[in-house]
Amino acid sequence: MAAPLTLLLLVAVTVRAALYRSSLADLISERVEVVSPLTAWKRVVEGLALLDLGVSPYSGDVFHETPLIIYLFHFLVDYAEITFMLADVITAVALYLSVKDYNKQVFRKQKYALEADRYPLDCLELIRSPKEMQYIPLKVAMFYLLNPFTILSCVAKSTCGLNNAVIALFVLSTIKGNVLLSAIFLSLATYQSIYPLTLCAAALLYLLQRQYIPVNLRRFSFWWFVAQYAFMYLGSLFVIVGLSFFLLGSWDFLPSVYGFILSVPDLTPNIGLFWYFFAEMFEHFRLFFLCVFQINVFFYTVPLSIKLKEHPVFLIFMQLAVISIFKSYPTVGDIAASFIKHHKASSASSLNIFLVSCVLLACSALFPVLWHLWIYAGSANSNFYYAITLLFNVAQILLVSDYFYAFLRREHHLSHGLYLKRKDGSEATLVLK
Amino acid sequence: SHAAIKIQPMRQFFSSGHTNNWAVLVCTSRFWFNYRHVANTLSVYRSVKRLGIPDSHIVLMLADDMACNHRNPKPATVFSHKNMELNVYGDDVEVDYRGYEVTVENFLRVLTGRLPPSTPRSKRLLSDDRSNILIYLTGHGGNGFLKFQDSEEISNVELADAFEQMWQKRRYNELLFIIDTCQGASMYERFYSPNLMALASSQVGEDSLSHQPDLAIGVHLMDRYTFYLLEFLEDIHPSSKANMNDLFKVCPKSQCVSTPGHRTDLFLRDPGSALITDFFGSVRKVEITMETINLTEPIHFVNEERQKETYSYVDQLPVSEIIHQKPKQKDWHPPDGFILGLWTLILLVFFKTYGMKHLKHIF
């Protein structure tokens, strides 16, 4: 598998390099769908320039990156393009390795289940064979690298690429079973933007499963492991935050980064849901709705973890999708990260993937059109743009729920047989309520 | 026999010190209900023109057009009194700055002469050091300011500085400043240039009041001070010998309700020796004589080489300092403690993950 992967990496790097050299690079780095106030490259350069002038980069509303990014780019600002291409490559390789490892585990579990005769006889066609899953890791890596959203995000030099790299490394270390690295990468991801906190539950569930510790709230071993993981996670988070303090000698990165993510002061239009609401909200309701919107991101953790506690890897991808839809400043880079799940479930059971994909494509095409009409031509207004944003997010939510449904249906078939029968023997279909 | 040639000195001819007269008359208010301010300015214009100053030497600035205003029931007229005795608009009014051109900037530019080269002569105050200038301002004012066009103000400090600029550029010989606004005396408080004489219609804290409304036209036609000033000036003719002391007596408190003020401490001559026509008229001194007059001594060209200090523009800039002493931009570097801590942690994690046995290979 190394050769096709290398070929794929070369192709991806070539495409990105070609786009960097063209005139589209400047155009793309201005687009609001691709960069947000959190991830824009322009702001990183501005922050570094402010630092060279002796001013804290967090003064004013320019720079909202974490101090580790300052440290990284202080030395790499001239090689920024290579850095972002490398980040994409790392993400793809990490995903490749993690999917390969996960496939191995899936096959092992299947083998045990087959030997234990746990599958009903008529659903053998649903069982995955190594042959059909052979190319899945490569396809996942290809899907990520050659995804136009990823390419756009990389060419715009949005630091979302770095976020995605850290999350991919987190996924890799979790699937490999390395508790320390998983905690560390998760804390790095949380340190960058707060939302990967929700992946904690998924990682915990997976690692518990891997170590054969049953998820029983009354068992000591469960709590002991949770305590260990939480200690490692929180410890590394505090260490990283403390280190960031020592970089600049002040705590102003805390309100600038985390205060900014949580309190959403910047209402530049993006492909998310926050800006429009908060632009027209009355001041005295703002805090309430802010809490509502932010809780919405974290809220799905508990129900999803309860439902998917047998399938934590799927849970990770679900959570990623939820984060990328509901976070305060989403960009297409986050959307790209959430599309990784496409190769996990078999698409035969999903209802309307084609329709939803068409909607997503159409919305992506309409974003620049309506932006131009609103800002430059003046014949549209923010409602038009927000409508397309809403439609995009609705399509994404439909996609997520479709995959969820497909996954659950497959699991149900695997446990109850392919041809469902009601108690009286008539045919039944499965519906997601 | 041939006539005896007598040489007479010229001292009497130039006793007043000025050779030409200018007038800058400004009305700063717009809108129909400020009819009286336009009437004020036009009445002074009329007097000044009647007494001999030509239009080419008058800069008339009217912020609004009352004669042709659609609310004027008597179009093409501006009256000073409801008896309609005097149409101060006349037949030959030449307005130099009209409507929105009457701004503080334009006024100050006219005074100081700093106008763009494309400005026509009719809009310029082309005075010299032998000019006597009359400046008349009217409108709405307050303590230390005069409102222009309902949107900006000129302060007494600005005005005083403008006059100082005029003095330094030798743009006047003597200047008479008359202002008819509320608290007008505050506008001449800050003058500090020589040869200025100022009159105002009211003291600080007092309002200047208008004279009478005309119920047919519907507005007040004129302000009290200027009404009585106009009455006073109507009695002046070009050869009149009335002097400034008479002008100070115009509109006492009984008639004006406010207390007119004046300021003569900066004026180098005795106000009693300054004639009204020195400012309001353009009196050409004509003396018919049959005698030869020796004007000046013949001019001797002084041919001495005076050491002219060449002070080029470039020398005034500290160029060498700028070039050679640019402060080196200090680049920010992360603190060493941070780098140390970060890499120690990374190494620790690395060894923890991959086992301590690799340490053997390093040490």
Image (tube, helix red, strand yellow):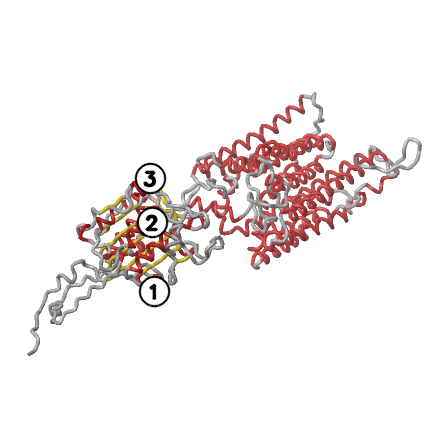
Closest to the observer, B327 or A366? A366
**Dot 1, how many residues are within 10 Å of its Cα: few (below 14), some (14-19), or many (20+)?**
few
Q: Is residue B178 left or right of residue A65?
A: left
> Mark 1 sits on what residue?
B121
The percent coordinates of residue A211 (x first, y second) are 68, 30
> Mark 2 sits on what residue?
B227
Write the residue at 28% across / 49% down.
B160
Q: CA distance from mark 1 to mark 3?
A: 38 Å
Mark 2 or 3, closer to the camera: 2
N-terminal of the two: label 2 or label 3?
Answer: 3
Write the residue at 38% across / 49% down.
B222
Q: Are marks 2 and 3 in contact (CB under 8 Å)?
A: no
Write the residue at 31% across / 48% down.
B228
Q: CA distance from mark 2 to mark 3?
A: 18 Å
N-terminal of the two: label 1 or label 2?
Answer: 1
**Dot 3, how many residues are within 10 Å of its Cα: few (below 14), some (14-19), or many (20+)?**
some
The percent coordinates of residue A47 (x first, y second) are 48, 45
The percent coordinates of residue A15 (x first, y second) are 62, 56
Mark 1 or 2, closer to the camera: 2
Amino acid at the residue labelled 3:
Glu
Q: CA distance from mark 1 to mark 2?
A: 31 Å
- Marks 1 and 2: same chain? yes
Q: Is residue B99 left or right of residue B248?
A: right
Closest to the observer, B342 or A28? A28
